[in-house]
Image (cartoon, helix red, strand yellow):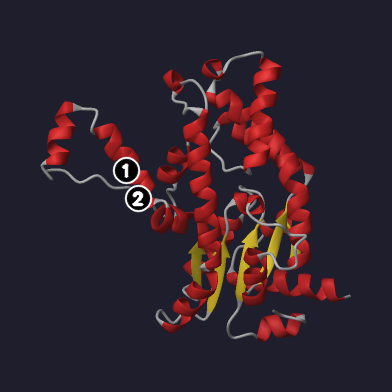
Amino acid sequence: MYSTEEEWLLAENKKVVLFGMSGLGKTHISNILRQSGEWYHYSIDYRIGTRYMGEHIEDSYKEDAMKSPYLRELLLGDSIHISSNISFDNLAPLSNYLGKPGNEGKGGLSIEEYKKRQAQHHIAEVKALLDTPNFIDKSNRIYGYPNFVCDTGGSICEVVNPDDPNDPVLKTLAENTLMVWIEGSSHHTDELIKRFDENPKPMCYDSGFLDLKWKEYLKINKCSVNDVDPDDFVRWTYSEAMAHRNPIYQSMASWGITVQADLISQVKTPSDFNSLIGSTISRNIK
């Protein structure tokens, strides 16, 4: 999209996609840019949770509500309305819907239901990513934003094949934006794992990877499906997923430019961001 540093800095319509591990600054940078009033912030996770999985999420709430005689009567009589209150800053409805597999008494989902929801998310993520050109157009034509930032989810690497030059998602993004990989160090990886251990959250995985890790977990822990502790499984799988995802991100980097997470953390203003991207483009040319 931008062949030189000067071309980037002088561009009246800057368009970028930020990708990388969750927790390395994608949303933080997107918020800084959005708050300037000059950048449209397109959140892939928000789009997934509203446009493509909102009905699934709300149906799950209604299904639980119908189990209560009190709520069932109110719901059937249209006396109450159940909806998801998802926002850019609160993606909990989407995260909670994805859930964790394991013992239902500990808040887990059956592995069959878990896989079904994972498949739903995979389809939704691809669609949300392919919507990017449409939102670039709308952000400028309707809302008048000159610049555009796409804030991707950490699982983008699970729905693309960076070694395929015709991968529909990556080809669409690369033709319409500058793709920016935020690369973390081993220190960042350790910190992310530590943070996840303290607060394990649902994640989206490639189906082949999930099947493999589910079988490995059962074998290593010598337990049945009903004995799986949901939090313990996702904690163990997270570090495995980090090792699985990093090579994919590295391959994806060839579709754009790479910026170190330590440098991203120093960005305080849109001007800082523009300078960092410009200097990175310059180094890539040399």
In this rendering, would 238 be left or right of 107?
Answer: right
| Cα–Cα gap, marks 1 and 2 | 6 Å
Which residue lies at the image location 46% right of the left edge and 76% below the top edge?
139
Query: Please, is residue 110 above or below residue 180 in the view?
Result: above
Q: Amino acid at mark 2?
A: Glu
Could you say which is closer to the camera, residue 257 or residue 221? 221
Q: Secondary structure at mark 2?
A: helix
Image-based side of 163 in relation to 52, left or right: right
Q: Amino acid at mark 1?
A: Asp
Q: Residue 157: x and y, percent? A: 67, 52
Q: Is residue 151 left or right of residue 240?
A: left
Q: Which quadrant of the rendered structure holds the N terminus?
A: bottom right
Q: Which residue has dot 2 on it? A: 55
**Can you identify the residue that label 1 sits on?**
59
Q: Are marks 1 and 2 in contact (CB under 8 Å)?
A: yes
Is residue 39 rendered to the left or right of residue 90?
Answer: right
Residue at image position (62%, 29%) is 235
**Does residue 2 sit above or below 182 in this rendering?**
below
Quadrant for the C terminus in the image: bottom right
Depth order, front residue of 108/24 = 108
Q: Which residue ends up furthest to the top in the rendered image?
A: 222
Q: Position of residue 196 (x, y in %)?
A: 60, 34
Of helix, strand and loop, which one carries label 1? helix
Above/below status of 54 relative to 3 = above
